[in-house]
Amino acid sequence: MNDLNLMAIFARVAEAGSFAEAARRLATSRSAVSKAVTRLESMLGAQLLNRTTRHLSLTEIGVAVAEHCNRMLEEAVQAERIVASLSTEPRGVLRVSASVAFGTLHIAPLLAEFLSMHPELTIDMTITDRWIDLAEEGYDVAICVTGEPPPNYVARKLAPVRRKLCATPGYFAKRGQPQMPADLVAHCCLDYTRSGGQGRWRFTGPEGEISVPVTGPLRIDDDEALSQAVLGGLGLGMLPTFIVGKDIQSGKLQAVLSEYIPVEQHVYALYLPTRYLPSKVRVFIDFLVAHIGSEPYWDQG
């Protein structure tokens, strides 16, 4: 086992290109790393590194040995992943990224129940609409809203994102309800700027896609803020039901032209492809699927 430790240290030196950087990654001293490589060379009876005062490079033998040592480390990591995936009780830290609106409204309220079910687990959660690179930034799972998940991730669909064109009953009492998308030219339309179609709203009717020019006193880049403006009676907004579903159910808002608005996005749980999915990731995603349901609770009724 001591020989394996020496090989692991050498693999880190070969990867880092210096004793100092390898020591930093291993959280040990430069001299300890240097001595470990010297002992490995003595044990193997071969020089693995060319050393100068300014440069470190692998010998021909060192290149071959480093390749096998790296493979050994990869197998060790896989062994750890097997243990994690087959563990009956998820433990450790689960790093989660979630989009701002969905994470705040529908993930955070569930965490108390989830963590009470798994007391050996803690969650490190980031609420952001910034794209997260799971591998680069060390996250286990990302909950995001997108039309098409990236091909280099495993994507599990959690819910459709249904948008509703809605306003308050008071607004419709004053301005009337639009019966066709073309009627919106006479309405006060509040524009969500992240939709990409600034100044025009797209619909799908019997004759195909319809693009309607819209105008209004507000352009805004946040769905939750837009919902507050709509609830205030300022005008019509195209909003996801995971934000305004309760307001539509309670009658605070009324939806119109729903038959013209297709489902173009979904909420996904994304994780890196692996042969052995860690149990902490699996139970978290299964928990979300069970609580959201095949028909999301915010769309019921």
Image: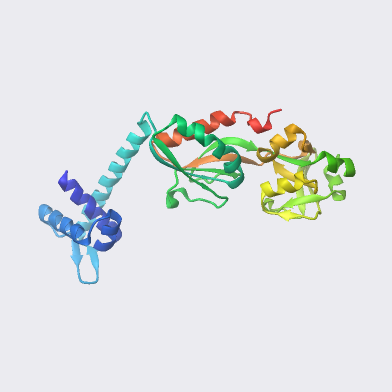
Q: Is residue 183 above or below residue 53?
A: above
Give the residue displayed 15% in from the left and 58% down from the top: 35
Q: Position of residue 176 (x, y in %)?
A: 88, 41
- Name the spot of residue 292 as percent of width and height, x first: 59, 31
Find residue 109 and report its horizontal and vertical position in percent. Answer: 56, 37
Residue 136 is situated, as x and y percent measured from the top left of the image, at 43, 52
What quarter of the picture does the C terminus occupy?
A: top right
The residue that appears at 48% across and 51% down in the rendered structure is: 133
Asked whether the viewer can see residue 277, the reply is no
Decide which of 41, 296 is in the foreground and name it. Answer: 296
Relative vertical location of residue 50 with respect to residue 174 in this rendering, above or below: below
> In the image, is 300 to the left or to the right of 275?
right
The number of discs equals 0
Classify the position of the N terminus by image quarter.
top left
**Residue placed furthest toward the bottom:** 53
Viewer-nearest residue: 254 or 193: 254
Residue 299 in view, yes or no: yes
Q: Is residue 52 left or right of residue 162?
A: left
Left or right of 86? Residue 200 is right
In the depicted structure, whether residue 292 falls above or below residue 68: above
Tell me how the rendering is colored.
rainbow
